[in-house]
């Protein structure tokens, strides 16, 4: 089953189904030679109904993880053609 994926993202949420979902994502990624990216989903419903979030959880959200920027090309950008002149 080669579907041409280069990246496979799977979100795990702690439910009973997450083992099946993870196994399936591993299989799809392996069959396609793709990178497997795993995320964790937090159900914030209980926190929202309490009216506030725990300070240690909020502090974790304030520190963004660094995302590397793609390397810049050293090639000069092409100059667009000039519009034709009218006389």
Image (spheres, helix red, strand yellow):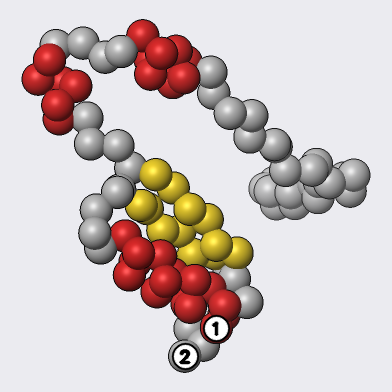
Position of 18 relative to 87 (above/below): below
To which residue does mark 1 refer? 31
Of the numbered discs 2 and 1, the one sitting upstream in the chain is 2
Residue drawn at 80 percent across, 41 percent down:
72
From this viewpoint, which residue is outermost toward the left?
49
Q: Secondary structure at mark 1?
A: helix
Query: In this orientation, does residue 85 appear?
Result: no
Tell me where residue 52 appears, x and y as whole percent. 21, 10
Q: State the SS at label 2.
A: loop
Question: How many neighbours does mark 2 have within 10 angstroms: few (below 14), some (14-19), or many (20 or more)?
Answer: few
Q: Mark 2 — residue? A: 1
Residue at left offset 36%, top offset 52%: 12
Binning the other alpha carbons within 10 Å of mark 1 as few (below 14), some (14 to 19) or many (20 upward) gives some
> Which of 68 and 26 lies nearest the eye of the viewer?
26
Total residue callouts: 2
Q: Is residue 20 visible?
A: yes
Point 42% across, 71% down: residue:
23
Q: Is residue 51 above or below residue 2?
A: above
In this view, 26 is above or below 64: below
Tell me whether circle 2 and circle 1 mark residues in contact (CB < 8 Å).
yes
């Amino acid at each position: 089953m080669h579907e041409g994926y280069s990246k496979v993202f799977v979100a795990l949420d702690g439910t009973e189904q997450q083992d099946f979902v993870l196994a399936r994502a591993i299989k799809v990624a392996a069959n396609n030679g793709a990178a497997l990216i795993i995320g964790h989903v937090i159900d914030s419903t209980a926190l929202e109904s309490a009216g506030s979030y725990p300070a240690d959880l909020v502090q974790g959200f304030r520190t963004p993880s660094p995302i590397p920027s793609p390397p810049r090309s050293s090639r000069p950008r092409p100059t667009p053609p000039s519009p034709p002149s009218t006389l």
